[in-house]
Amino acid sequence: MGLLETWRETAYSKETDKKTLTKFWSEYFVLEKKVYQKLLADPEAVVTGTVKELAERFELSVMEMTGFLDGINDSLKMPNPIEEMDEDTVVSLDFDTEKLYKNMVDAKADWLYGLPEWETIFDEEKRNALYREAKRMNTIVKGKKVGRNDPCPCGSGKKYKYCCGR
């Protein structure tokens, strides 16, 4: 079984009781926050190494590092091969700062997008713009409702109630 599969089985287990999972995630989020604080302190630095080396560097277990890599992968300039990685796989944490910020907003991770390190990367106006953009990406806009006496949108020329509205 690969690292990612093991991580996901543990983190999203259906058999584990809710209290245990809540404790697991609470502890993980504290560790995740510390890693992001280190990464955002120097956002231009490209951090690379094996999964095991990065785990040691950020004081995480290999499993916790796997979870971190799973979470940041969508924000990287070049995604890592997380599906088939083992602890000797070389990975990179070369992230796109705008994409990372928007993904944190999208994940509702206010403890991450609210980190003070963001203030040195983006000014308040830029952070607000990215926040609005991230929120807008997931907003579903419904089209105008067709009234029963309106012309049918299929283009038949009939009233909606006599055509597709039946």
Image (cartoon, helix red, strand yellow):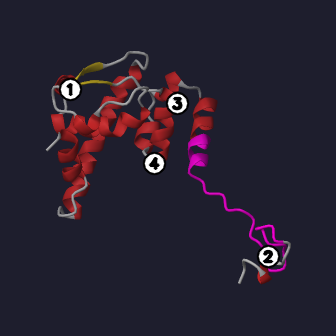
**Mark 3 or 4: the one toward you:** 3
Residue under the image location 26 percent in, 49 percent down: 25
- Residue closest to the far top: 45
**Mark 3 or 2: the one toward you:** 2
Residue named by callout 3: 98
**Pointer 1: residues within 10 angstroms few (<14), some, or many (20+)?**
some
Task: Tell me the tag on residue 40.
Answer: none
79, above or below 145, in the image? above
Residue named by callout 1: 89
Residue 50's x, y, as percent? Answer: 20, 23
The Cα–Cα distance between marks 1 and 3, rounded to whole angstroms, is 26 Å
Residue 47 picture quarter = top left
Q: Earlier in the sequence, mark 1 or mark 2?
A: 1
Range covered by the magenta-colored residues: 132-156
127, above or below 49, in the image? below
The Cα–Cα distance between marks 3 and 2, rounded to whole angstroms, is 42 Å
Q: Amino acid at mark 1?
A: Thr
Residue under the image location 66 percent in, 58 percent down: 141
Residue 51's x, y, as percent? Answer: 21, 28
Residue under the image location 41 percent in, 38 percent down: 112
Left or right of residue 61, residue 164 in this image: right
